Amino acid sequence: MGCARLASVDLADDGGPFAGHEFDQAFLSALGDGVDPCGERGEFHSFVYAGPMLDSSIPVAVGETVIRDHFAFADLLCG
């Protein structure tokens, strides 16, 4: 089970089809050279839905993905 999903991805940084994807090893392995694996320079934003800092996990489903400017935004829905 994962603990975070990618809410938005900068397509200029070769974010590809990863909006809505789990923040996992497959994503980290696909990152291009020069992309910060923590997204500290705005390459992507994540949503944490499970972990020790939460009383319980938040059920998350991925909805529509919208591309605006050079970013892909995934709708993350409760459920």
Image (cartoon, rainbow, N blue to C red):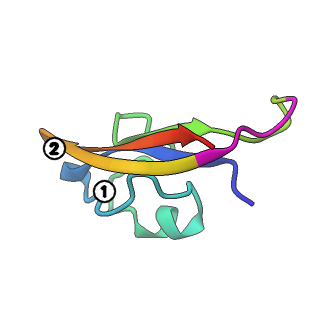
Residue topped by disc 1: 15
Counting every numbered tag in the picture gives: 2
The numbered mark at residue 39 is none
Secondary structure beneath disc 2? loop
Secondary structure beneath label 1 = loop
Q: Residues within 10 Å of mark 2 (few under 14, many from 20)?
A: few
Residue type marked 1:
Gly
Residue 34 in the image: above or below residue 32:
above
**Relative to residue 58, is residue 21 depicted above or below?**
below
Please tell me which residue lies in front, 52 or 57: 57
Find residue 41 and report its horizontal and vertical position in percent: 36, 34
Going by the picture, which residue comes out furthest to the front?
Answer: 79
Task: Write the residue at 42% across / 46% down.
Answer: 36
Residue drawn at (39%, 59%), measured in percent from left and top? 18
Residue 66 appears at what percent x and percent y? 25, 45
Residue 17 appearing in the image: yes
Q: Earlier in the sequence, mark 1 or mark 2?
A: 1
Q: Position of residue 46 (x, y in %)?
A: 51, 39
Q: Decide if residue 37 is in sight here.
A: no
Tell me the amino acid under the disc marked 2.
His
Alpha carbons under labels 1 and 2: distance apart: 10 Å
Q: Quadrant of the N terminus?
A: bottom right
Magenta stretch bounds: 55-60
In magenta stretch: residue 6: no
* Residue shown at 51% from the left, 43% from the top: 38
**Residue closer to the observer: 70 or 58:** 58
- Majority SS type along the magenta span: loop
Residue position marked by numbered label 2 in the rendering: 70
Left or right: 47, with 31 as reference point: right
